[in-house]
Amino acid sequence: MKIAYLPLDDRPCTSRFPRRLGAIAGVAVESPAVDPYNPDSEGVRLWLLGEGEHAKVISVDMLAYGGLVPSREILTPFEECADTISFLPEITETSSVYLFHSIMRLSPTIRSPGDGELAESLRRHWQGEKVELPPGCLERYLAIRKRNFALNCEILRQHRRKPYSYLIFCSDDTAPYGPAAAERKELEKSFEGPGMILPGADETGMLLLTRAILDERACRFKVCPLFFPDDSRRVITKYEDRTLEDLVGRQIEASGAVAGKDGDLYLLVSGPLGSQKEALFQERGPETQALCASLAEKARTLLGAGKLAAIADVRYANGADKELVSRLREEVPLHTLASYAAWNTTGNSTGTALAHGLCRRLGLSLPPGPLRTRAERSHREFLMERFMDDWAYQSIVRPEINDLLQK
């Protein structure tokens, strides 16, 4: 099986992760060579119109603007952007097409301390406070915002006229106020056809790619989410706008799987005790130790029964729970896990762990041979990389480097 994938941008999490998940499932995922500084929309169009792939997973932001960050910054007129994406319905005549398109977030891209101050001023402005903004700043911001929302609506019109296999509007802005929230509500009111509005952005490509593979293989795996502690399912974590349980449920739906008690995959979610803290400020105590022990024991029991266990480590934001990983290293052969993730936001981690776990399940269904061997190797490499990056680097090495720099 071969799938064409146009990523959100050129970051590893949005470009390389999906291709590697494809390899874990035994699927060739191909992407065009895209220069983020000089995007060739015509070249990408011709590449997407080419035949040979079973399905095509396409980021509208990359196609129309050149990526997620340019979508917030460039002033390309709506008419030009709409013309760029006008050919998309043609692709549905020869391939299954899966689209994802971001709803512009409230905050501008932060490249410097000055950008951070601007983002804070805009936040206060949308909350109704009187603030001074640089001349022309608000006008430019609103022009880009208006253009982007118009393109959201254009994609939705295409979807209503001739439905794509699946359409996701993704949002990495969870603020309950301001234009992003209003745009989400407007899109929800007029959304028709297969698809959804999903919180988060960076994990969306992985989830949609997984759905495309499951559809092509005619699979509907069951995922059983388990929360540690159980009441963490009701917590709204940092950078999210809904409970942990709702977030995971939406991601399961987006991935093409279904939630169930007896799962083809068990997703063990290590949630926060109360409000979520940053991984830099980890706490260790009897309650934390007991929860880590409970999750490790459950993983060991599932693995011993021949089940697939994936772990989303979201007790903290932006890094792994050191106590949990220590316990897992003692009690569970790490290479036997279906997946592990603990990077950046809760949605990033749960989405990665879920997509990886489902692709691992697909890889295990391959017949013995070179493809199965390559899928196994790809799985182990990606799994160990997650531990080395999300745990070893983000929770141990990076804080130590920060301390040294501050001294």
Image (cartoon, grey):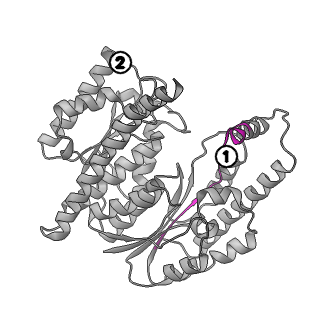
Q: Nearer the viewer, residue 21 or 302?
A: 21
Please say whether residue 130 is visible from this viewpoint: yes
x%, y% of residue 178? 72, 43
Q: CA distance from mark 2 to mark 1?
A: 37 Å
Crowd around label 1: few <14 · some 14–19 · many ≥20 (10 Å): some
Residue displayed at 53% across by 52% down: 201
Towards the viewer: 115 or 246: 115
Residue 169's x, y, as percent?
A: 57, 57
- The answer to which image quadrant residue 377 occupies is bottom left
**Residue 107 on the magenta span:** yes
- Does residue 126 appear to the left or right of 187 in the view shown? right
Tell me residue 165's x, y (percent): 47, 70
Name the quadrant containing residue 331: top left
- 247 left or right of 158? left
Point out the image quarter for the N terminus. bottom left
Residue type highlighted by circle 1: Ala
Q: Hey, what amino acid is under mark 2?
A: Arg
Identify the residue under disc 1.
Answer: 181
Query: Magenta segment, which residues?
Result: 97-117
Q: Is residue 15 above or below residue 83?
A: above
The question of residue 245 being in magenta is answered with no
Q: Please report the residue visible at 59 percent of the width from the left and 58 percent of the height from the top.
A: 68
**Mark identifier at residue 284:** 2
